[in-house]
Image: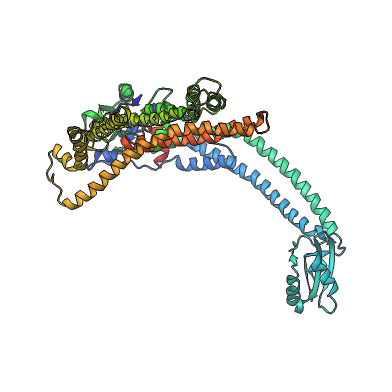
Amino acid sequence: MAIEKLNFVNIMGPIGKLDSAVKLCFDFNGFHPETASELVGGHKGFMPVADPNPYSSPLSRATEMLSRAELTPLAPKDGALDLSGASDFIDRTTQSLDKLSGQISKNRDLIDSDDKILTQIAPMLGIKTPLSKIFGLEYIKFRFGKLPRDSYEKVMIGREGQQFIYMPSSIEEEYVWGIYFAPRGAIERVDATFASLHFERIWISSRADGIPSEVYDILGKEERTLSLEIEKLQKERDAFLAEHRDKMLETTAVLQYHSDLFECRKLAMRTANNFFFGGWVAKDRAEEFQKLLESLDGITCITEAPEDNSALPTPPTRLKNRWFFRPFETFVKMYGLPRYGEIDPTPLVALTYCILFGLMFGDVGQGAVIAAIGFIMYRVKRADFGKILASIGLFSVAGGFLYGSVFGYEVLPGLRPLEDSNLFNMMMFASIGFGVVLIIVTMTINIINSIRRKNFTEGLFGNNGIAGVLFYLAIVVGVLGLFGFGQSVFTVPYILVFVVLPLLAMFLKEPLGKLVKRQKDVVPKKKGEFILENFFELFDVLLSYITNTISFVRIAAFALNHAGMMMFVFILARMGGSENLAIVIIGNIIVIGLEGFIVGIQTLRLEFYELFSRFFSGEGREFRPINKLSSKLK
């Protein structure tokens, strides 16, 4: 339940063994490489390995081939590869698919064109004159389209003396379809007249040059023929894909593997005859990894612990947690990753998140529903979120026993804060007390992390360091003694030692830190600016102590809110005298969905803002094996 210990492995050998060494690292699935150019620094004689990737072009064509075939690529797969043969297969397959797909697409375009023409001439079926004769008129222009019914009536009434002839072809409920004719010289004036009457012109395709009813029948038959042809071509394409699908997928997967493998060579540096690269492996597998590489002739490996060589790069972070805690790594990664050597916050997040959720959303029945949903989600999709739901659902069940609530029915013995004001007050103070404990725990973790990083300034004098803990504890103990036991501990010595002195230490954090490190310039040069800046910073720190502590009141608040929401559901269900079971069920569903979501977000807020902000910077970088990193190198 911690960050996995790592060792750094330096790998050297003759340039002819580079591909073999990279392949062993790739297949080991536990080697996180560092860029060799950064490791060798300014050493002369080293040059990058920058050979062009021979798999890049065929892989690109293979990926495009799968896209055209609407196939999802498989994961990269090791296997023998004849690059020339694979390239020929990709080209032949792509050409065959393009030919079939092109014919299908062409026929579909023809059908779309026919559909458009059929739509155009459907209102003209009453015209018995071939449209080619109308198209060919030299001195007369025509327009086909539709008029609103009221506009049509105006046209028919006022057409005397106008330079146009209007011929309706189809009369519908709202529109009248038809053609108007006008002399070439008057067509613009007539167009303006019809535009004012809201005439919508329809452009007729030149393919519709016969009698509309005959053209309609011909195009209908053509559509049916094209549809049958498409069906035949689709079957041919499906048969082709069924025959070649496995080889297409396997070829692409193997190409992807070899391409990724080749890209990993870029991590190495070389001289005329040798290569060098290095990276991180788990400490408990370092010996196994070293023996594996040294089984290659001429390969030399040197393993170092990061604690023994400060010149090594900062190790990446690889979280290693047990089954219950592992799903909650998702929440940690949402904020960031701890740096190597720090305390992994995952177990703390897992326990506190579940406990807080259970206290804020305590119901035996509703918690069991959430747990069941999470279990099903995990079984079906193997999703970590399913495990999280199952865990918080079980803690919600435990909280339900605390409050005696089953689907909102208070049928079990338990706490009833809405019925007892003293219990209500006790829950509010208990929530704050629980928050105080968590804040002190996180401040303690920050002290440990600071010491591990050798950041003694933050560990000793920071607002989340020893000075901050002393001040916070002094205030908490003083307030608890005064209001809880009626005894004041705020004597002059107590205030001077546990309140004033820690505040001064936090105020003078930077000078005191330089003093501890035996650095020069302990006294700030700009004293006024230093005092003003640190005054406001200290003021902000004091406010954060108060707000972070009070923020935990939401634990009790949401517990009461849950009881209140279920009370409202039962009021609605019993308005008719007898209890309406349907309203109870719907109310429970709404509460599970809505309040469960809100409580989940609020709990995460407590984790991130009240706890993580005190000890967790999230500045670590993720451990990524070379076979997962390769696609990012391109």
Q: Position of residue 423 (x, y in %)?
A: 44, 27
Residue 244 lies in quadrant = top right
Q: Is residue 291 visible?
A: no
Residue 145 lies in quadrant = bottom right
Left or right of 262 in this view: 450: left
Q: How many marks?
A: 0
Q: Position of residue 534 (x, y in %)?
A: 23, 46
Q: Position of residue 216 (x, y in %)?
A: 82, 55
Q: How did the renderer colour the structure?
A: rainbow
The C terminus is located in which quarter?
top left
Residue 191 lies in quadrant = bottom right
Q: Residue furthest top?
A: 413
Which residue sits at x=47%, y=43%?
57
Q: Position of residue 248 (x, y in %)?
A: 56, 35
Q: Is residue 155 visible?
A: yes
The N terminus is located in which quarter?
top left
Q: Nearer the viewer, residue 160 or 578?
A: 578
Left or right of 246 in this view: 303: left
Q: Nearer the viewer, residue 331 or 313?
A: 331
Q: Residue furthest front?
A: 486
Q: Is residue 334 above or below residue 393?
A: below
Q: Nearer the viewer, residue 311 or 406?
A: 406
Q: Nearer the viewer, residue 218 or 140?
A: 140
